[in-house]
Image (cartoon, helix red, strand yellow):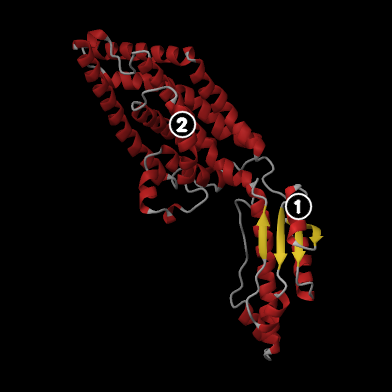
Amino acid sequence: MKYISQWISDWYDIFTREFRHIFSDSGVMVIFFLAGLAYPLLYGLIYRNGTVDDMPIAVVDDSSSAGSREFVRALDATREISVAFSCADMDEAERLLQQRKVKGIVMIPSDYEECLASGRQAHVSTYADMSSFLYYKNLTMGASQVMLSEMHDIQASRFSSAGYDGQQIRQLVQPLKYEENMPYNRNFSYSIFFLSAVLLIVVQQTMFYGVSMLTGTMREENRSFAVLPDRLKGHGISRTVLGRGAAYWLLYIAIGTYVAALVPRIFGLPQNCPFGEIFILLLFYVSACVVFSFTFSSLIRHRETVFVLFLFMSPICLFLTGFSWPAGSFPGFWKVFSYLFPSTFAVRAFINMNTAGASLAMAAPQVAALTIQIIVYYFLSCMSVFIENQLLKRRQKG
C-alpha cells in the first residue's frame, strides 16, 4: 500500500512538472494551442467551398466542324464547366489563362471530325490552372463526362449504320444497365474528401512537434527529459513515462474532441457516427500519439530540427493514410512505413465512421493496430528513458 501511494505521489509530481514545462515554453504553447486549434479552422476556411461550379474555360476549336461544335456545347452544359471564350489559337487561350480570366483550356485538333468519320481515335487536349486542385478536378471531370457521352453516341451511330435495330444497339452499347450512386460525397466536395483526413493529422503532428521542441530545448540547456527523482536511484521509469504522458494526453483529449467533433459541425461535414464511438477512437489515438511522440522525440538534439521535420513529414503522413490513393496499391516499402504512424490507422477509421457511418466494431482492425502501437511505443519510450539515464550517469561520473 505504501508503494502504491508513493508511486501515485511520484507520478503526480512528474505530471505537474511536465505541465509547468509546457506552459512555460511559448513556442510549445503556440504549437499546441494556436496551431492545434487554428489549423483545422484555417483548412476549413480555405476549402470551405468544396466544389466549383461553371468554372470558366477557353476552347480552341481548330476543327470547326459539326462534331466539334456539339462537343463544345456539351462541355458548356456540364455543371463543372462554362465555356467563357472561344479562341482562334492557343496563344490567345494562354493569354487568357495567364490573365486569370479562365481556369482551363480545351483544345480540339483540326482532324477531330476526320478521325471520327474514319473510325480512328480522336484526341482532345485539356490544360488546367494548377493553382488549385479544384480547377484540375472540374476540367478533368467535365471533359471526361462529355467524352464518355460522345463515345456512347458514336458507337450507337456506327451500329446503326451497320444495320442493327434499336434494341440490338442498346444491348451492344450498354449490355449491363447500371446506376451511379455515391452516398457519402454526392457532389464531389473537396472539403469532405480532404478535411476528414487532415483533421486527425493535426493532432499527431502538433503533439509530436511540441514534445520534440521541449526535448530539444532541454538538451540544449543541458537538461534531460528522462530525469528521475533522486531517491529512486534510477528506477521509476514507468511513472516518468506515464506522468509525462498524462499531461499531453489530458491536453490532447480536449484538443482532439474539438478537432473531431466541433470543427466538422462548424463546416457542415458529415457526422454519421455517434460521438461516443468517435471519442473511444480518440482515446486510443491520443494515447498512441503520446508514446509515439516520446519515442521519436528522444532522437531530437536541437529545437530547430522540428521545423525541418514539419515541412518534410506532414505531407507524407497525410498521403500514407490512403485518403487519396488506395492503401492496397501502395508499394511494399511505403505500406510498411505507414504502419509507424498512428494517423495511418486513426484517419482511416475516422473517415469510415464519421463520413460513411461505420460503427466502432467495423473499425476494430484499426483500433487493434493502434493498441499494438501503444504497447510497442510505450516500451520504446521506457527504453529511451533508460538509455538517457545511463548516459546521464556516465557524464556525471566522467
- Name the residue rendered at 69%, 60% in the picture: 142
Front position in the image: 168 or 108: 108
Marks 2 & 1, CB-CB < 8 Å contact: no
Does label 2 or label 1 sit earlier along the sequence? 1
Judged by depth in the image, the label closer to the viewer, 2 or 1, is 1
Residue 374 placed where, x, y %?
Answer: 35, 34
Disc sitting over residue 308 in the figure: 2
Residue 236 placed where, x, y %?
Answer: 25, 17
Q: Residue furthest left?
A: 397
Q: Judging from the image, what secondary structure is the residue with disc 1 in?
A: helix
Asked if one can make out residue 267 in the rendered structure from this viewpoint, the answer is: no
Q: Judging from the image, what secondary structure is the residue with disc 2 in?
A: helix
Residue 188 placed where, x, y %?
Answer: 64, 52
Give the residue number, with chain letter if any, for mark 1. 95
Image quarter (top left, top right, bottom left or bottom right) of the C terminus:
top left
The part of the image, by quadrant, that contains residue 46 is top right
The part of the image, by quadrant, that contains residue 123 is bottom right
**Is 320 rendered above or below residue 241?**
below
Residue density around tag 1, few if under 14, some if 14–19, many if 20 or more, within 10 Å: few
Separation of marks 2 and 1 at Cα, in angstroms:
38 Å
Asked if one can make out residue 228 in the rendered structure from this viewpoint, the answer is: yes
Looking at numbered disc 1 in the image, what kind of residue is underneath it?
Arg
Looking at numbered disc 2 in the image, what kind of residue is underneath it?
Val
Residue density around tag 2, few if under 14, some if 14–19, many if 20 or more, within 10 Å: few
- Name the residue rendered at 62%, 47% in the picture: 190
Decide if residue 275 is on the left or right side of residue 390.
Answer: right
